[in-house]
Image (cartoon, rainbow, N blue to C red):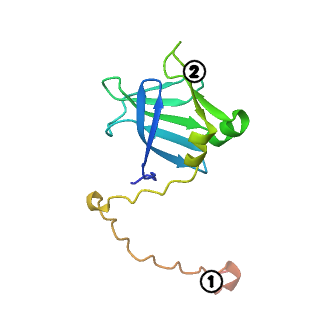
Amino acid sequence: MSTTTHDLQPVTVAIDDIAFDRYHYDEVADTLCFHAGPAAWATDFGETAEEHLMRFDRHGRLLSLTILNAGWHLERDGAIDVTLHDGGLTTRLPREVVEPLLVETPLATPDRSTETPPVPSSPRQPRRARASRSARAPSAGR
């Protein structure tokens, strides 16, 4: 089974002490996701003070930051605030930085070389219509 993912686009955005180098935006869900460093499996999850979502690897390194309702936040506040650490500094991402990113990024082309091909199904046989009781021949003895 494959899932729909977006191609990651290059970007340079620094938030607190993290340099994010890739992003994707999903217009339908209005989610803007920044990624930092090489891809790795997330093993822990958290939220910022603003309720943005964070994913961490097994060493505690921040892998990604997902901003839910990014366009809505930008319209309402003119910027998006992010506080990565409890009691830490809040980074304000101004409209000039965020707005150009709020364009749907292309869907990734799945790597089909590792997928198992689907099992062909047998052709479906049409159902035979059953005659209604009134259309059946009368039985002997009735």
Instruction: Please state the horizontal and vertical placement of residue 42, each as a whole percent of the image.
Output: 37, 33
Based on the displayed image, in which of its 4 quarters is residue 56 positioned? top left
Read off the residue under disc 2. Answer: 49
| Between 77 and 68, the one nearer to me in the picture | 77
Is 41 located above or below residue 29 in the figure? above
Crowding around mark 1 (Cα neighbors within 10 Å: few <14, some 14 to 19, many 20+) is few
Q: Amino acid at mark 2?
A: Ala
| Between 109 and 25, the one nearer to me in the picture | 25
Asked whether the residues under the numbered discs 1 and 2 touch, taking CB atoms below 8 Å apart as contact, a structural biologist would say no
Quick one: SS at disc 1? Answer: loop
Is 28 located above or below residue 72 in the figure? below
Crowding around mark 2 (Cα neighbors within 10 Å: few <14, some 14 to 19, many 20+) is some
Read off the residue under disc 1. Answer: 139
Q: Amino acid at mark 1?
A: Ser
Residue displayed at 65% across by 42% down: 71
Residue displayed at 31% across by 39% down: 38
Is 126 located above or below residue 32 in the figure? below
- Which circle, 1 or 2, is nearer the viewer? 2
Q: CA distance from mark 1 to mark 2?
A: 79 Å
Quick one: SS at disc 2? Answer: loop
Residue displayed at 65% across by 85% down: 138
Instruction: Please state the horizontal and vertical placement of residue 99, each as a whole percent of the image.
Output: 61, 45
Instruction: Please state the horizontal and vertical placement of residue 62, each as a whole percent of the image.
Output: 39, 28
Residue that sits furthest to the left in the current view: 114
N-terminal-most mark, 1 or 2: 2
State which quarter of the image contains the N terminus.
Answer: bottom left
